Image (cartoon, rainbow, N blue to C red):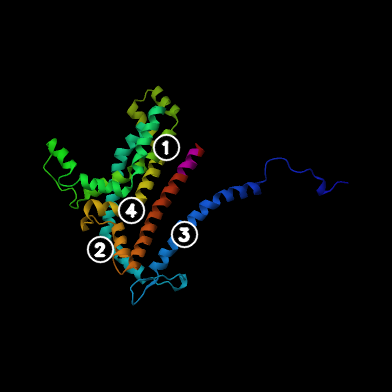
Amino acid sequence: MGGALDYPPRTGPPSARVRAGFWAALATPGTLWLVALFVIPSYAILAVAFGGIDPILRTTDPEWNPLAWEFDTMRHVLDRVFTDDLRRVFARTGLFVLASLAGCCLIGYPVAYYVARSAHRSRGLLLALLVLPFWISYLMRMLAWVNLLQTDGYINRVLGWLQLGSSRNWLDGDWPTVVFGLIYGYIPFFILPLYAALERLDGKLIEASRDLGASASWTFLRVTLPLSIPGLMAASVIVVLPMCGDYYTNTYLTGGSPRTEMVGNQIEFFLRGSSQPQTGASLVIVLMVLLMVLMAYYLVTIARSQREAAAA
């Protein structure tokens, strides 16, 4: 009489446990990367923000035990953020980021749409031209613009040649220069994910709209634009997150003018140029929380749209 040991060996696909272990093993490098470059640095920032200051050397004295954390500095920073001088810095940063995001939409959407609808051969060339600026350091590109925007730079020469105004000092600390720099620096990050979303659109829907008598502009407004909103949101999140912490652009294009100071400049000042690193670390935490709220809204919106698409 045969027992359990008499069953023939399994020859089918691997079991669910083996498949789960396989995918978990593939995720191990990414998990280690995330822990090393996000979890540990984030905890170090918390230890500095809620730690102390060496009374003699005035250097940071991180507190690694959460039970011994002190929150006086965080309370003081939150008070300044909501009622005092830092409120203006956060509001200015938000306005700069929104203006830059609007510029990225106005410039980047037509470019991404054109690349997505171009022929396959020219599409590769256009994509290569889009990623070409990534081959040059962001710092080098900003320094190049400093030379171009100087009073005797090529920008003023071209404007004078076109008789579009007298010579202007673009680097005197006005906000349009900062917004221009943010748009220039981050617009490739906006175009590429938006292009990927537009390139995946079902062309049959557009053809059906045209066959039913809709004009090209009406088809774009009622078919293409609504379907590209998830890609538009993804591109917006990708550029907004680094813009909020950017400090290079303002530093190089306006010489760190107080009139265009952003949150990133305040964080750099407190962490590197003052004896208040706790304040800088607390500002990092406040900014992280604000950006996490933005990310949570994005994830909830995308999940809702996916559920609605699956139910349709």
Q: Give the amino acid type for the residue marked by disc 4 in the picture.
A: Cys
Tag in front: 2 or 3? 3
Mark 2 or mark 3: whose residue is earlier in sequence = 3
Mark 2 or mark 4: whose residue is earlier in sequence = 2
Q: Quadrant of residue 259?
A: bottom left
Residue 69: give x, y in percent of width and height. 42, 71
**Residue at the spot of label 1:** 196
Mark 1 or mark 3: whose residue is earlier in sequence = 3
**Neighbours of disc 4 within 10 Å: few (<14), some (14-19), many (20+):** many
Mark 4 or mark 3: whose residue is earlier in sequence = 3
Disc 1/disc 3 C-alpha distance (Å): 30 Å
Tag in front: 1 or 2? 1
Magenta residues, start to end: 304-309
In terms of secondary structure, where does tag 1 sit?
A: helix
Q: Quadrant of residue 87?
A: bottom left
In terms of secondary structure, where does tag 2 sit?
A: helix
In terms of secondary structure, where does tag 3 sit?
A: helix
Q: Residue 6 carries which label?
A: none
Residue 280: give x, y in percent of width and height. 33, 64
Contact between marks 4 and 1 (CB within 8 A): the answer is: no
Q: Give the amino acid type for the residue marked by disc 1 in the picture.
A: Ala
Q: Residue 244 carries which label?
A: 4
Disc 4/disc 1 C-alpha distance (Å): 24 Å
User: From where the camera sits, is residue 158 visible?
Assistant: yes
In the image, 45 versus 225, the foreground residue is 45
Mark 1 or mark 2: whose residue is earlier in sequence = 2
Tag in front: 4 or 3? 3
Q: Which mark is residue 85?
A: 2
In the picture shown, does residue 209 fall above or below 79?
above
Left or right position of 96 against 130: left
Disc 1/disc 2 C-alpha distance (Å): 41 Å
**Residue at the spot of label 3:** 39
